[in-house]
Amino acid sequence: MKRKIKWNRLLFLFFIPVIIVLVFYLVSDKKEVESSKDIKKEIISSKEIKNENTIYELLKNATIPLGHTMYVYGGGWNEQDTGAGIEALTIGESKNWESFYLEQDEYYQYENYNYQIHDGLDCSGYVGWVIYNTLCNENQENDGYVYKAEEMVYRLEEMGYGKTYTTIESYSPGDIMSTDNGHVYIVISGCEDGSVLLIHSSPPGVKISGTVDRNGNPESQAVRIAQETMKKYRSDWYEKYPDCTVDSSYLTDYVQFKWNDSTLKDPQNLKEKEAQEIINLLFS
């Protein structure tokens, strides 16, 4: 006599391991999703922290090419000369800049190297590079911030980063200064005698300079600090290019751009510090 097969029992025994396997994979997948969420949170958190952009970061970035980057007309621009080139859309400096600098002597004539765009920076290419390295986290994140010198402050205002002023009452660290004469620079600090300590790319290259004082005296506080800073921290450059003085037009012919607090914060209170204190902080 044949045994009657109990199909219900067989089906039950068959589905038990299937159910166990399914439960295992569901739990495992849930853990992976949660882990992925945690990683994503960490990435977002890191980006948010990095995006706490500051005036200190702007000025610190401005010192990166200092004393080993030559002024090259068109440097920082693209081949079409319409906006930012690859260097001004890159986090960090180009190795070409220092290599080109090391090839030059004290008689450097920038006119001989116009549009060798990968070898150095002109004034707006430099400021655009500094701003990109301050506001952006990745290479080629946007179209960059390289504009004609006389347009730069107005473009930054249009983007909602701050406001422009034609009447200048005081200078603050990080101010961007543009002139119709085709130059743009970054303020490090104003000084008590009315002079301004600044950083820019101007022949022969990226350097710290000081203006005359309010009375036109070239032996100003800003000039003294500029000379001492370049001599101490960029001695090789200073031996070849010791001139750290700019004329009174830097005080009279420029439109001022001031950053919004929401764009660049000032947790180091640079706006409350003297010029020498800021230099000490930047090079410490």
Image (cartoon, rainbow, N blue to C red):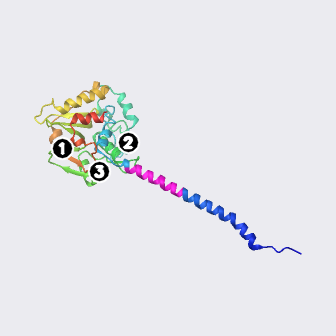
- Of badges 3 and 2, nearer the viewer stands 3
Image vertical order of residue 146 relative to residue 21, above or below: above
Label 1, on which residue? 254
Disc 3/disc 1 C-alpha distance (Å):
22 Å
Q: Secondary structure at mark 1?
A: loop
Viewer-proximal residue among 42 and 166: 42
Q: Residues within 10 Å of mark 1 (few under 14, many from 20)?
A: many
The percent coordinates of residue 154 (x first, y second) are 24, 51
Q: Residue at x 23, y 31 (%)?
A: 226
Label 3, on which residue? 263
Q: Sequence order check: which comes first, mark 3 or mark 2?
A: 2
Label 2, on which residue? 87
Magenta residues, start to end: 32-48
Which residue appears farthest toward the top when viewing the image? 239
Q: Secondary structure at mark 2?
A: helix
Disc 2/disc 1 C-alpha distance (Å):
27 Å
The percent coordinates of residue 87 (x first, y second) are 38, 42
Disc 3/disc 2 C-alpha distance (Å):
23 Å
| Residue 183 in sight here | no
Of the residues shown, which amino acid type is indicated by label 1?
Tyr
Q: Residues within 10 Å of mark 3 (few under 14, many from 20)?
A: some
Q: Sequence order check: which comes first, mark 3 or mark 1?
A: 1
The percent coordinates of residue 141 (x first, y second) are 39, 50
Name which quarter of the figure residue 17 lies in. Answer: bottom right
Q: Main secondary structure of the magenta part?
A: helix
Image vertical order of residue 196 relative to residue 31, above or below: above
